[in-house]
Amino acid sequence: MKASFIKVFGFFLIGMLSFQLSSRDALSGSIRSDIKSGSFYPSSRLKLEQAIDNYTYRAGQSKVKIPLDKSIKALIMPHAGYIYSGFTAAHVSKVLSGDSIGKVILIGPDHYVGFTNGAISDVDAYKTPIGVVKLHEDASKMRLESSLFNPVPRSDNIEHSLEVILPFLQIYLKEFEIVPIVLGSCNTSLVASVVGEYIDNNTLIVVSSDLSHYLQYEEAVLKDKETINMILNMETERLKLNKNSACGNIPITILLDIAKRHGWSPVLLHYSNSGDTAGNRSRVVGYCAIAFY
């Protein structure tokens, strides 16, 4: 009986250890690894850079009216697999120059875990096949100075909304540090107020969000047009109530709140959905790239 108990207990300990090790897969020491490479985007640096270069070249053929007398303050970018949303994401290349941007506040939605307020990683850096991006000192300051933000390792291990847009920024901005924020349900006005305290002239806010999910092509185009117009018209309250408008509804709402406080104005850079790229038109996901000046 005693030997049997020891044997069972031993298997239990081994199982617990295996679970703990697997839950740390994305967190190799103080660096968050690129857990979505090879699925959402290429795992090879060369192939990843070639893919982004190709999307960027094609995006360069699009005509967009951009304010020449104002500096870029924020972006909304999609976070799907690159074969679906990479072309739209690459349109931010039209407005980005790394000369004056040293800090990027990344804000994305929680897709998997389910928590309140914000998760800010306590790692030192994020890794992609292109290289390592350090966390800005403001990441730890936010965690220490506000109860709204805490590390959530489980989210770090599986969330894709920030990682997927990072390679584009690495190509377009070169040298910068990040404040990675993943948001669950929260008081959007309160979060906007706290995040706003960390904005200076060298800061770019990048919100990660797709638009409608799994509608038929024509229905999605109409739905996404409605959502985009809400963003362009800064209709925060309507956006909050609009079902299936965007998976990053909360981060977008926070960005609009910050934009209103700072007097920023949005400009649509590009819209598409997965039916325009590599997907079936019977069930599509919408994407937009929007810049704020």
Image (tube, grey):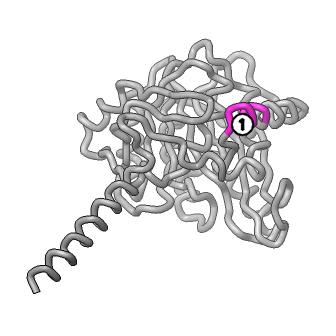
**291 sits left or right of 193 in the view:** right
Residue found 56% across the figure and 53% down from its top: 248
Question: Is residue 241 or residue 26 the one in the foreground?
Answer: 26
52 in relation to 191, above or below: above
Residue 41 image point, x, y percent = 68, 46
Q: Quadrant of residue 184?
A: bottom left
Per the image, label 1 sits on a secondary structure element best described as helix
Residue stretch rendered in magenta on the structure: 44-50
Neighbor class of circle 1 (other Cα within 10 Å; few <14, some 14-19, many 20+) is many
**105 sits left or right of 242 in the view:** left
Q: Residue furthest bottom?
A: 1
Residue found 32% across the figure and 57% down from its top: 20
Residue found 20% across the figure and 76% down from its top: 7
Residue 18 image point, x, y percent = 34, 61
Question: Is residue 152 or residue 146 the one in the foreground?
Answer: 152
Look at the image and say whether residue 46 sits in the magenta stretch.
yes
- Number of marks drawn: 1
Q: Quadrant of residue 238?
A: bottom right
Q: Quadrant of the C terminus?
A: top right
Q: Please state which amino acid type lies under the numbered disc 1.
A: Leu
Residue 42 image point, x, y percent = 70, 43
Look at the image and say whether residue 162 sits in the magenta stretch.
no
Residue 57 image point, x, y percent = 85, 30
Residue found 73% across the figure and 28% down from its top: 93
The residue that label 1 is drawn on is: 48
Whether residue 186 can be seen here: no
Question: Is residue 188 or residue 40 the one in the foreground?
Answer: 40
Q: Residue furthest front?
A: 3
- Prevailing secondary structure class for the magenta stretch in the rendered image: helix
Q: Residue furthest left?
A: 2
Q: Quadrant of the N terminus?
A: bottom left
